[in-house]
Structure formats: structure tokens, C-alpha cells
Amino acid sequence: MNIQDLTLFVRTAQTCNITASALQLEMSPAAASAALKRLEKQLGVQLFIRSTRKLRITAEGERYLLHCTEALAALEKGKASLNEMQGKIAGEIRLSTSSDLGRNIVLPWLDEVMDVYPELSIQLNVGDSLADFFHDKVDMALRYGEPEDSSLVAFLIAKIDRVVCASPSYLAQYGEPKHPRELTLHNCLLYRFADRAYDTWPFADHTGKYAVKVSGNRLSNDADVVHRWVVAGKGITMKSRLDMAADLGKGNVVELLPDFTSPPISLWLICPNRTQVTPAMLMLRDLLRSKCEAELS
């Protein structure tokens, strides 16, 4: 049997859409339809019930899907195992990363990696929800905050301080806060994660600690949106220094309250188990560490 036909069958079962599956595999819809019919003929069963409006997998298709998925996964693991024996940087990396970090920091780094290692392919999932390694079909996730699940394999990439910042245009109009308590007089740009708004910002100096509850007229569950708001002069925010490093360097935003510190946040590369710790993954870990160090120095 043709491995591409099996891959197409699995994708079609997941999407219930031949055209979408064909596009993912760079096939024409007609070629995809013909491939599925060829597979059905080889198996002697009907895998899908087709109508003019929708596609539905049959009971026989459901049973075959389980074995087909396991077989393709075994083949991929076998390929990864051979690459590992040879220390070869090849195969596929399925990486999940948060929105701001993925779009504005990691994306150009991955482009550099693929230029150096042409046999490597990357699937990048960008979003701020926590990665579900099974349902999202990812091998590793790059996330802020130490993972709570001790069964995961986690590599510390960097410890990064948080920075309070605003654009020069905002400060020219509304003035610059000199103490964390003055943030209550300003429009603060807030981030929401898992239905929780991060509206209490922690600070410390030689006199003690401060927990300031802030507010504003903009809140988003997408960290990249908050980033864009602060650069556009819509208010003040607290973010990872790594996320804001480029704009701080260009003068697009200004660091505020330099005499006060906030607890640092850690960046981790997380895998579900040891089978994902391939030469390609270790290369990516080392690259992320060196790139973060250079960006923050």
C-alpha cells in the first residue's frame, strides 16, 4: 500500500473533508478522491460514506483508522530512531509556542535552522492556550512558566525578567509613572489566560514588595495583541523582556520604573516523553538557549 494513501486516509478521517486533506498533502482533490477509492479497493471495504454535502467515516473505516494511525506513527518513530543513531538533524519537528514569542521572536530563528538543515521540516502551532500533546499533535512546546506535570520532559531555556513599558507617544501625552502605585492612574494593557486576567503586577525595591492592581480599557487573550497595543501607544503593559527586546532596542517603547524589580519568568522547552528527545530537538534546545542569551545581553 502507498504510504501517502494511508496518510491521506488519516487526514481525511480527521477533517471529514477530502479537499482540505488534499491541500495539506499538496494533492489535487481529484487525485485525493482517486487515492481513497484505490485504498478502498485494496481493502475490499468502504471507508467513507460520501454525499454531495458531507463525508462520513464508516464503522469499517473507524476500525481501520486505529491501526493505520498506529502504523504511520511507528514508521515515523522508526525514522526518528535511525536519525538518532546517526546523530542526524532531519525529520519533522512539531512545535507549539505562544503567540507573541512565536510570531515575533522564534519564527525567524526557525527560518535560520531550516536553511542550515534542509532535511528538517517544521510544523509550527502558534497560540496562547496550553499545548495538548495528543490532540494538537505536537512533539514539543515552548512556554513561559515551569510545567506543573512532573511526567513531562522539560528543559530550561532562560530565566527572563519582566519589564513595564510604554511608547514615547503615550508617555508624552499622559506622563511617566515614578512609583508602581502610580500605575493605577494609567491605562494598563492586560493579558488574560485561562479566564484569568493578569491585573495584579508584583514589584519590589529596597523598601519592600508591592502588589499593584491595575486596570485599563484593553484586555486580550493573545499576548501578541497586547504587544501591538503598547507599541501603538494605547497604554502601559508588563511583559517578558524577551518579547519586548527588539522594540526596546529600537526605541519603540521605553522601560519604566527601572528602580523596581519584578519576579523573573522562566522559559521552558517541554516534551511529553523521552522519545521526542531527538538530535533535532536537542539542536533546537541549544539554539533557543543561545539566541535568548544573545537577545537579552
Image (cartoon, rainbow, N blue to C red):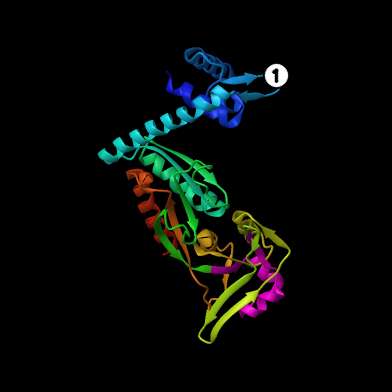
Left or right for 270, reference 258: left
Q: Nearer the viewer, residue 53 or 174?
A: 53
Secondary structure under the numbered disc 1 in the rendered image: loop
Q: Residue at x 47, y 47 (%)?
A: 108
User: Dot 1 surroundings within 10 Å: few (below 14), some, or many (20 or more)?
Assistant: few
Asked whether residue 258 is in view, the answer is yes
Residue 152 position, x and y percent, is 42, 53
Asked whether residue 257 is in view, the answer is no
Q: Residue at x 40, y 40 (%)?
A: 114
Q: Which residues are magenta?
A: 163-192
Q: Quadrant of the N terminus?
A: top left
Q: Residue at x 67, y 66 (%)?
A: 235
Where is 91 relative to 228, above or below?
Answer: above
User: Label 1 is placed on what type of residue?
Assistant: Thr
- Which residue in the structure is indicated by mark 1? 52
Q: Nearer the viewer, residue 115 or 160?
A: 160
Residue at the left extreme of this rendering: 86
Q: Quadrant of the C terminus?
A: bottom left
Residue 185, image quadrant: bottom right
